[in-house]
Image: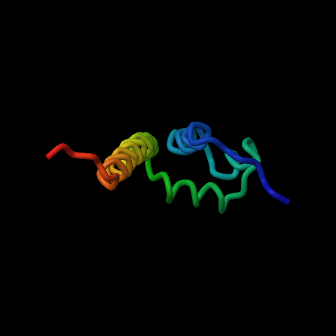
Amino acid sequence: MKGKRFTEEQIGTVLKEGQAGLGVGELCRKYGISEATYYHWKAKYATVSDLRKLKALEEENRRLKGVVADQALDIQTLKHLLSKNWDRPQ
């Protein structure tokens, strides 16, 4: 059975509460997660700022992939145009 899916914002909220001093057991009961999940999140998203950095990098990566796709399309179009036999006047 698949568990709940938490967004990065929700994970950040859980970790903030943990850093504020709320006990791990209490957090786990409150959000319905296991202690292993909490510690996994804590290791993966060491601080909330890391979470923000990760989100910013993912957005930049998405944008750059779009740029690369546009350039690849431009190159393909130019190659296609250059491969045609043009009737050139002599």
Q: Which sits in the foreground, 83 or 68?
A: 83
The residue at 40%/40% (across/down) is 63
Furthest residue toward left: 90
The residue at 72%/43% (across/down) is 31
Coloring applied to the structure: rainbow
Counting every numbered tag in the picture gives 0
Res. 59 image quadrant: top left
Furthest residue toward right: 1
The residue at 58%/60% (across/down) is 40
Left or right of 11 in this view: 65: left
Furthest residue toward front: 90
Left or right of 77 in this view: 7: right
Give coordinates of residue 89: x percent, y percent: 18, 43
Give coordinates of residue 7: x percent, y percent: 62, 41
Give coordinates of residue 90: x percent, y percent: 14, 46
Left or right of 18 in this view: 50: left
The residue at 44%/44% (across/down) is 62
Q: Quadrant of the N terminus?
A: bottom right
Left or right of 15 in this view: 77: left
Would residue 41 be seen by someone viewing this image from the given angle? yes
Would residue 50 be seen by someone viewing this image from the given angle? no
Give coordinates of residue 49: x percent, y percent: 40, 41
Q: Which sits in the foreground, 82 or 9?
A: 82
Res. 14 image quadrant: top right
